[in-house]
Image: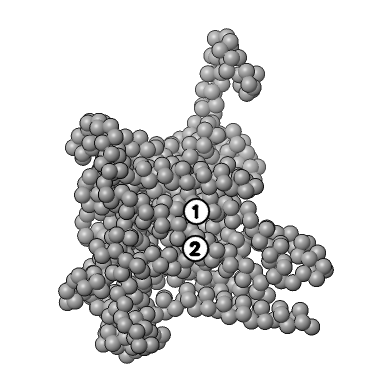
Amino acid sequence: MADIGTEHSAAYHNAVPKKSFRSRLRKTWNHIKRDRQLLLLFLPCILFYVIFRYGPLYGLIIAFKDYSVFTGVLGSEWVGFKHFITFFTNQDFWILFRNTLLLGMYSLIFGFPFPIMLALLLNEVRNKWFKKSVQTFSYLPAFLSVVIISSMIIDFLSPNHGILNQMLAAFGFEKKYFLVDPGWFRPIYVISEIWANAGYESIIYLAAIAGISPTLYEAAKVDGASRFHMIRHITLPGLFPTMLIMFILKTGSMIRVGYEKVLLLYNPMTYDVADVFSTYVYRKGLLESNYSYAAAVGLFEALVAMVMLLSANALSKRLGGNGLW
Amino acid sequence: MVGERKISVFSVINTLILCLVAVATLYPIVYITAVSLSDTAAVVQGKVFLFPKGLNLEAYIEVLKNDTIPRAYLNSIFYTAFGTLVNLLFTAVAAYPLSQKGFFGRKFFMMTIVLTMFLNPGIIPTYVVVQQLGLTDSVWALVLPNAIWTMELIILKSFYENMSSQIREAALIDGASEYRILFNIVIPLSKPALASIGLFYFMGHWNSFFLPLIYLNDPDKYPLQVVLRDMLIYSAENDAGLVDRSALAPQSIKNATIVLSMIPVLLIYPFAQKYFAKGVMLGSEKG
């Protein structure tokens, strides 16, 4: 058969006589004819991915053009790397770079252990009812929108009536303007991130723990291992592959910090620590209609994200994990 | 025995920590609700901690009398219902052919679809596409650009793959078309899976604020989250001393709106959380 893939297949294909090519074409045509109903069902999916997923990828060429709504993507003028050069030589660049990286890194470093610890603690609970209740409550925040979560943050930290400032006042401290203080922006962002995500992410770790063979625990028990020993020597090593996968995924998305929350929480006084690539893209592109420039910034962000994902994957493989691919 | 006592001490501490976790997650929600039910004066003086002070429904009556919020609420319901329906239809119809072993070009299609999970062009190019198609300021701008979530498509596809192929073969022999098999057999049989992915779509639409913010220009079309965001920005700027206090919606009204926006979520939560955990698991296995 001509279509069995071998190392020589390329050379072989060139040597295939015309007749065989035609018969393959006919075979393909018959395949299409046989699947015509399925293909018709699949058409909306093809259109969706072509227009809304690959279309914007093609649309990235506006990063190298001077796009305007009137000239369109194709009609606008090529300008090469102009927007990239403007961006890299802009004094905002380093501030944005630092903010994005720090916010992403803090979320990753401080946010990573919480779901694991929560899963470990939940796993040690013997009372099923209690375990289920805590679990149910813990992923409730995953159902709340960013707007609501940000709203709660603003409420709690409000200097006028916020509960935290009242507690500070009760202990004789001065009122703090948390949300306009640049020093507080990152802690607030990271803590609220943990609050919103720890429960939800613990589901994955709990399932991974459930997948660890019970015979390991039984054998350890016979040998007189304590709970801490079992956590240290059975559960944690058993969780390691899951942790690696989560780590890769999180590193890949690190640079895309939750810009929605930043957008809701920052203000001119905290721009210096809070402004990240995505919020900059939003302001330049959508508020100031500087599409091409913003697309260039977005493309740079996407490339950095890709590099980080690839390096995390390589690192995971070096550590003996599987990696994503 | 020493070992036994150690274990019980551990259990007590563990229980305490987990209780703390539960309280920490629930408290903000309880607090918001308490404020929404309290007297404005008590809120301003900061007397509300856990239970409403001067229990009344004034804030809710105020919210319902106001014409922005009820309209935004109806908009949200419409966008969510319509959007989820479109999502489910697109996903189900796309997952079915992909789940068939001999489907033409299956490998190629799967590869190009999965690839999009790693290639993210960012918001601007997508915005340009939506703008060039003339979808801006209509419900289609909120629905079509995310008609299929790749992760949910993969989940549903593997669910279909695990369904018995004998029913389909029998139906084909009986002369049924693929459309009939999909809509009369496969979709009714996959209700649990559809409920699971439908939940994610539902939450996505109900909680979405960025897409309506960038795609809708007419304030009459704003969903609840965008209206909430406007109230929020005002209160944040007030805290920063950037805005005149009189321009500000009272705290209790803001919180009443938040509670109203959480109601649909809290109503489906008891049913949803079962599917939710399942969905997260399926997603992570495939991811």
Q: What element carries label 1?
A: helix
User: In the rendered image of this protein, does residue B46 appear above or below residue A255?
Assistant: below
Q: Where is residue B5 in the image (x, y as percent from the top left)?
A: 73, 83
For badge 1, the amino acid type reads Lys
Please state the chain letter of the residue tagged with numbered disc 2 in the rendered image.
Answer: A
Q: Which of B225 and A238 is in front in this view?
A: A238
Please state the chain letter of the residue tagged with numbered disc 1 in the rendered image.
Answer: A
Q: Which of A192 and A5 is in front in this view?
A: A192
Residue at horizontal 53%, vertical 18%? A25
For badge 2, the amino acid type reads Gly
Image quarter hosting the N terminus of chain A: top right
Residue at horizontal 26%, vertical 87%? B41
Q: Where is residue A242 in the image (x, y as percent from the top left)?
A: 61, 55
Q: Which mark is residue A250?
A: 1
User: In the rendered image of this protein, does residue A34 appear above or below residue A293?
Assistant: above
Q: Do the residues labelled 1 and 2 touch (CB within 8 Å)?
A: yes
Q: Which mark is residue A111?
A: 2
> Is residue A75 something one can see in this rendering?
yes
Distance Cα–Cα, label 1 vs label 2? 10 Å
Q: What element carries label 2?
A: helix
Neighbour class for label 1 at 10 Å: few (<14), some, many (≥20)? many
Residue at horizontal 26%, vertical 52%? A283
Residue at horizontal 51%, vertical 27%? A32
